[in-house]
Every structure is written in structure tokens, then in C-alpha cells.
Image: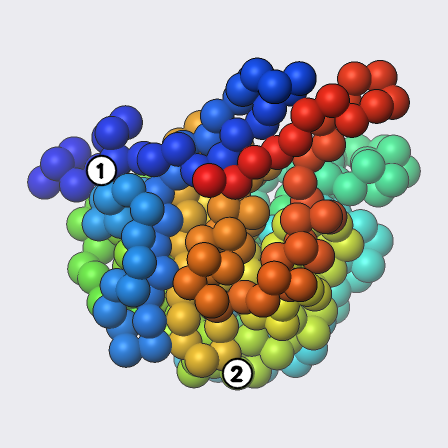
Amino acid sequence: MMDALSAKPNDFVEAALLVRAGMVESRHRAIAAIVSPDGKLFAELGAAKRLIYPRSAVKPLQAVAMKRAGLHLTGAELAISTASHQGTPEHIRLVQSILANAGLTESALQCPLAWPGNPEARSAATAQSRIAFNCSGKHAGFLAAAVAAGWSTNDYLAATHPLQQLIVEVLEEYSGEQIVNSTIDGCGAPLHTNTVEGLARAIGKFAATDRELFDAMVGNAWVVGDQNSADAVVMRATGFVAKIGAEGVFVIGTPEGYGVAVKVADGSHRATALIALEFMRKHDLVSQSQFDAVFTELAPKVLGGDEIVGEFVLL
């Protein structure tokens, strides 16, 4: 069943090109879906009913479950519970605050050891740490939610833990799909499949109904990734919620309830946000000026020495 629904090479369509001196040098193929506020598929590229692992693109939905369990955070601390942060000192302080307010220390985190992703923070670090892992904000949120609900914290990543079961309920509710396969994500937390369409439906419903989380993310865009991460750039330019997921996943949700999900076949992030924005632009869901602002900041420059010798093209 799962293999029959998982994406095949022909399910992806060419969506972006990198052109150097008139010759196509690289191609990005993608599946994309837009779901309207009524939950119906509005537009698609490729086969939007194929299963993918959404990776960190579902962190906003995991935060919905945390709140239902009793997590009480606001502003930047709430935003970092949805984040794939880059380990700057400011990010680390937010994670430490969540843990401290729950009566916990960094030793409670069960995400892997990592160096900070931010180059300056990496240069300043003297050792890897669990709190520098880009999912530590989510893990701190998991732990704080478990404490608030009176659940155990030593096994908070177990699939049988009440919080992880609540996350499954939220994912199925918001996506309108039953989960048919689960595994373990890179951070050690349970990871569940969605179709590209279901992921778009979920982020659209999230954007329309979870205003506190929406405002926390958009109002603290740098917290969700870093100052120049693709999701932060999109949120600043559009006012929509956006989130990166590993292996070429990107989602956007509008306050009206439109949801967009993209999966790029090669797993690269170079094209994901731009493919999503171009798809939205074609369907009048972002303005040309909003699109241009994101494109200017995120499109790769094709250089020959110091000169522009090509362009990044969206199809």
C-alpha cells in the first residue's frame, strides 16, 4: 500500500532551471499542491496524492498538539517550538528559557549532538551540544508540554507516549488523511507520511485556525530558521506562514486558509520556496511585488567570476 502511494520519478514535473551561458546546467523537478480554504485541491504540479515524508514542515502542527497538551508559551518562545533554528546565541537562550520554566535542564533533551548551523555561532562553539541541534526548540516544547500535562519526560519521543499520539491525531485531523506509515526523523522524533496534497491542506488549516502560533511564527520569522533562511524570507515578504522541511519540502499557509506544499525530487532547498511562490503567483495568491522581493533574496546568482553569466528560471 505504502509503496503504491509513494512518489515515483514520473510523478515529478520540471519546475526550475539553472541556466549558464544559454545552456541548462541543472534542473529541479517537483510535486506541488495548493489546497483552498474549503479543504479541496485547488491546483497541482505532478501527482499531489503521492506520499512523502514532510520532515520539519509539520513542526507547526506538532506545536498545535503541544498547546492542546497544555503548553503555554508566547512570542519568540512559541515560535521556536516550531523552528529549525540555526543555533545562534539568541536561539539557544529561547530554548534554555523553555526548559528552565518547565523545571528542566539541557540534559533532558534527547535530540542528537550538533554544531550550530549559523556560521558565526559555529565558529564560536567549542563543542557539539544537543541544544545546538536545529530541532532543540521543538524538543524543549515537547518536554514542556509533557510537564504541563503531567506526562513522563524520559520517554517523550516514544511513539506510544501520549504527546506523540496526540500529534498523530492532529496530523490526521488537519491533513484529512490517515497516516499509513511512520518512521523516525533525523532528530529522533516519530515521523509520519502525508501526501503532498494532505500536507498543503494541513498548513492551510493551521494558518486559518491557529492564530496565536501563526502570529508567533510570522512575527518572529528569524526564530523559525535564521535571518536569511528561506522560510524567514517568505514570511517577512508576504505575511504568510512558511516552513522548511528536510529533503526539499516547503510549505506556506495564508490567513485565508490556502495551503501550499512542495516536494523537490532531488532533496535540494535551492528551489523549494521559489517554486512554491511561483505556483502561488500564477494563481493570484501572492502579488508580483511579493514574489519579486523573495526572488531577489533567494534566487541563486549564476556567476562567472564576478559577472552574471546566467539565470535561475522558474517554469
How far is mark 2 from mark 1, CA to CA? 32 Å
| Front residue of this view, candidates 269 and 309 | 309
- Compared with residue 61, is residue 303 higher up or lower down, i.e. above or below? above
Q: Measuring 67% from the left and 55% from the top, which residue is drawn there? A: 292
- Compared with residue 30, is residue 109 higher up or lower down, i.e. above or below? below
Lower sequence index among marks 2 and 1: 1
Left or right position of 14 against 268: left
Amino acid at pointer 2? Arg
Residue 41 found in image quarter: bottom left
Left or right position of 50 against 117: left
Left or right position of 71 against 133: left
Q: Which residue is mark 1?
A: 6
Residue 164 percent across, percent down from the top left: 36, 61
Residue 278 percent across, percent down from the top left: 51, 52
Q: Measuring 64% from the left and 37% from the top, which residue is drawn there? A: 113
Amino acid at pointer 1? Ser
Q: Which mark is residue 211?
A: 2
